[in-house]
Image (spheres, rainbow, N blue to C red):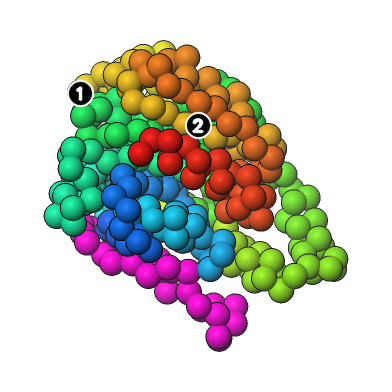
């Protein structure tokens, strides 16, 4: 696994072995080798900056990284680390134009050294906000990216449901919590997410522990609960722009978003693109994500809606049965 975490059972194997190939400040880039080298295009995975990266390598048999490496895909995973007080001045632009740009170039260089990539490109997969970052990055640096995959990532923020309502500029000023705390604190964000569906915290425990459940699913539930409570701060300056420019002004869709003084034009994305949505996703409702294809320059946009919520649809039992095979089939077509 990506982080030090005590397995539910002392005899349980950790999900997947990895190698850290680059580290800077809090973040790092890790490499997972494919089971067999079949010359498949390497894939870079970008999680949200407010969640720990090990959601994508959660537990043996519940690891998307493990599934893809078992199917012989080389994987590079971004681990954003945990921002601390001195990181409160990191800009949202920095995540795209400096940090992600550096990580993509490092992954390409490493993949060329290993003989994995011969064209100087890499596929990119973003989960949640990581998908927004990845797509914005691809619009700015399309020559570095072979194809784009988004897992439940927001794009049209006017359709972000309850989060759009709660961040309405008439009632919410994103500078207030960050002025008070420096960074946006994880407990404040977590309480907001839980308030969107307050009964979920009770019903999921009842369903898991009082109904017949295989031990493997109980171990998955415990690991997922640990991850869900293991959130990290959102650097203050980055948070302010993210809320103002995206949620409050919807600049990405309107073609007005500026990153590092450069305009983000989604028409620059001509690569094949796959976007997943989940029918019960209250954090990124389907209509917030599926509309992306209308704004790209790509002639090969595919949208797939699956059953489930924002997390379980990706890493839970349904994700393993529905999303993972569809993702693998699409990747194989890209080879």
**What residue appears at the point 61 percent right and 29 percent down from the top-left corner?**
286
| Contact between labelled residues 1 and 2, with CB atoms less than 8 Å apart | no
The part of the chain drawn in magenta is 1-27
Q: How many labels were placed on the picture?
A: 2
Residue 291 visible in the shown view: yes
Is 15 within the magenta? yes
| Horizontal side, residue 107 vs residue 32: left or right | left
Bin the neighbour count of mark 1 within 10 Å (Cα to Cα): few under 14, some 14-19, many 20 and up. Answer: few
The residue at the far front in this view is 38
- Residue picked out by circle 1: 261
Q: Which mark is residue 275?
A: 2
Can you say which quadrant of the picture contains the C terminus? top left
Task: Give the x, y percent position of residue 29.
Answer: 28, 56
Residue occupying the point 50% across, 78% down:
13
Can residue 65 be seen here? The reply is no
Tell me: residue 71, above or below residue 14.
above
**Where does residue 88 sit, x and y in percent of width and height?**
31, 48
Report helix, strand or loop for mark 1: loop
- The residue mark sitting in front, 2 or 1, is 2
């Amino acid at each position: 696994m990506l982080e030090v975490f005590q397995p539910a059972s002392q005899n349980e194997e950790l999900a997947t072995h990895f190698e850290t190939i680059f580290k800077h400040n809090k973040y790092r880039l890790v490499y997972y080798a494919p089971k067999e080298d079949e010359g498949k295009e390497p894939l870079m995975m970008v999680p949200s900056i407010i969640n720990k990266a090990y959601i994508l390598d959660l537990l043996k048999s519940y690891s998307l990284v493990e599934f893809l490496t078992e199917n012989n895909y080389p994987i590079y995973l971004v681990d954003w680390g945990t921002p601390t007080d001195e990181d409160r001045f990191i800009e949202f632009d920095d995540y795209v134009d400096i940090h992600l740009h550096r990580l993509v170039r490092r992954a390409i260089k490493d993949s060329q050294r290993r003989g994995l990539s011969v064209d100087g490109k890499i596929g990119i997969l973003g989960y949640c906000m990581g998908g927004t970052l990845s797509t914005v990055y691809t619009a700015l640096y399309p020559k570095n990216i072979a194809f784009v995959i988004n897992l439940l990532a927001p794009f049209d923020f006017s359709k972000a449901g309850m989060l759009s309502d709660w961040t309405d500029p008439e009632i919410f000023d994103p500078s207030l919590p960050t002025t008070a705390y420096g960074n946006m604190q994880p407990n404040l964000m977590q309480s907001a997410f839980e308030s969107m569906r307050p009964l979920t915290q009770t019903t999921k425990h009842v369903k898991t522990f009082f109904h017949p459940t295989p031990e493997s699913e109980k171990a998955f539930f415990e690991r997922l609960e640990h991850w869900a409570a293991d959130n990290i701060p959102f650097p203050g300056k980055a948070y302010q722009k993210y809320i103002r420019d995206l949620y409050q002004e919807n600049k990405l869709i309107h073609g007005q978003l500026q990153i590092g003084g450069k305009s983000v034009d989604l028409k620059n994305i001509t690569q094949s693109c796959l976007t997943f949505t989940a029918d019960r996703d209250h954090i990124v409702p389907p209509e917030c994500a599926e509309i992306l294809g209308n704004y790209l320059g790509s002639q090969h946009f595919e949208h797939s809606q699956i059953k489930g919520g924002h997390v379980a649809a990706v890493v839970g039992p349904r994700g393993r049965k529905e999303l993972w095979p569809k993702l693998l089939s699409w990747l194989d077509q890209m080879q």
